[in-house]
Image (spheres, coloured by chain):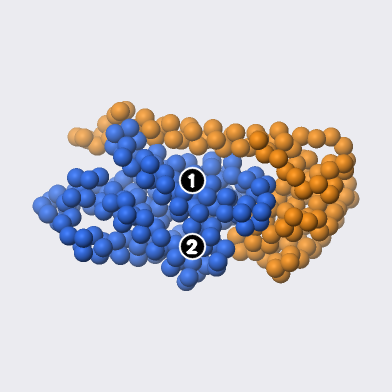
Chain colours: A blue, B orange
Amino acid sequence: MISSSAKIPSPARRIAYCGVFAAAAMIVSYLESFIPVGQLIGVPGLKLGLANILVAVAYFSLGASYAASVSLVRIVISSLLFGSVTSFVFSLFGGILSFTVLFLLGGQYKKSIGLIGISVLSAAAHNTGQILAASLVMSEISVFIYLPVLLIFSVPCGGITGTVAEITLSLITGSRKNKGNG
Amino acid sequence: MRTKKTGQKKTVFYIGDIISVAGVLLLSFLVWSLFFLSGKGDGETVVVIEGGSKTVSEYDLGHDGVYQITSSNGHILTLEINDGNVSVTSSTCDNGYCVGMGKINGTGETIVCAPAKIKIKIVSDGEVGQNDFIVG
């Protein structure tokens, strides 16, 4: 993580990349609203969480603080453009918990865990965060009844996002190596 | 720890990946078990609709019917009781989790619609009026 981050020379370039990642994350989360995964498998509201690909790639190519800002910018702007106060609270809780997982396990990346494992746990944390937000909004603990099914689906969803993130990251770091200092 | 190799030095799966998947599935099972066990009960059952923490209306599970529930914030849910099964057949809320929950029929089982702030719960007759739902 640190070695790949060090290959990007200036903070200005990192911030520029950060903007690109945030924009891509927004586009991806907008596009995934057209993929009715939830309706297809009978869990409406379930999403693939494709934006997490960008957050994970930003984390391992730019650094933790840049990835956090990519996630935050996406949540704030998406909620302002397409969502509501409720969806903002839901996304924020999910975003904070999934980023915490990324932050805690980031150091173990390519040592004992790959992006698939990290993404599965991130997705699980994201869903838990959303359910937590729902239980706080409603002051009702029984919304946790949704958690088991959401946790099960976080395995395939996290698997897909983790695989795509791994490929994207290897392409980015690969092209950077080819160009020397990128 | 590398468990599988493709090509020169690319590693696909790590031990942590397998532990993560197993852990998430186990957690899912544990949460489900908590709800399942806490929902065990005997006696006649009724359906209670709650907005926030108060009981809005009650329906006898033994009587089939279709009911319209309007939430305090304007969402309209269609509740169907059919042969002891309770389901939300339509809702004006935007995420539709409540419709996706399908049918419930056991004591303690719930359907929740977060946007409408409505909870539909099957309780035994003795529990009517109690709002406690203890998990773990």
Q: What is the chain letter for disc 2?
A: A
Q: Tell me which corner region of the image, top left, top right, bottom left or bottom right, holds residue B92.
A: bottom right
Q: Is residue A11 left or right of residue B47?
A: left
Image depth: mark 1 or mark 2 in front: 1
Which of the image's four quarters has the C terminus of chain B?
top right
In this rendered view, identify the residue nearer to me: B82 or A83.
A83
- The residue pinned by badge 2 equals A34
Q: Which residue is at a point 45% across and 52% down the rendered structure image?
A: A96
User: Considering the numbered disc 1 on the image, is that residue within a helix, a strand or a loop?
Assistant: helix
Indicate the quadrant containing the N terminus of chain B: top left, top right, bottom left or bottom right.
top left
Q: Is B50 on the left or on the right of A113, as rendered?
A: right
Q: Amino acid at mark 1?
A: Ala
Q: Amino acid at mark 2?
A: Phe
Q: Is residue A151 visible?
A: yes
Q: Residue furthest left?
A: A180
The reply, left or right, for residue B118 in relation to residue A131 is right
Q: Where in the figure is residue B45, as x and y percent of width and height?
A: 85, 43
Q: What residue is shown at x 33% (from left), y 42% (from top)? A: A106
Task: Tell me, for residue A125, which label it has, or none.
Answer: 1
Chain assignment, label 1: A
Circle 1 Cα neighbour tier, 10 Å, few/some/many (<14 / 14–19 / ≥20):
many
Q: CA distance from mark 1 to mark 2?
A: 24 Å
Q: Residue furthest bottom?
A: A81
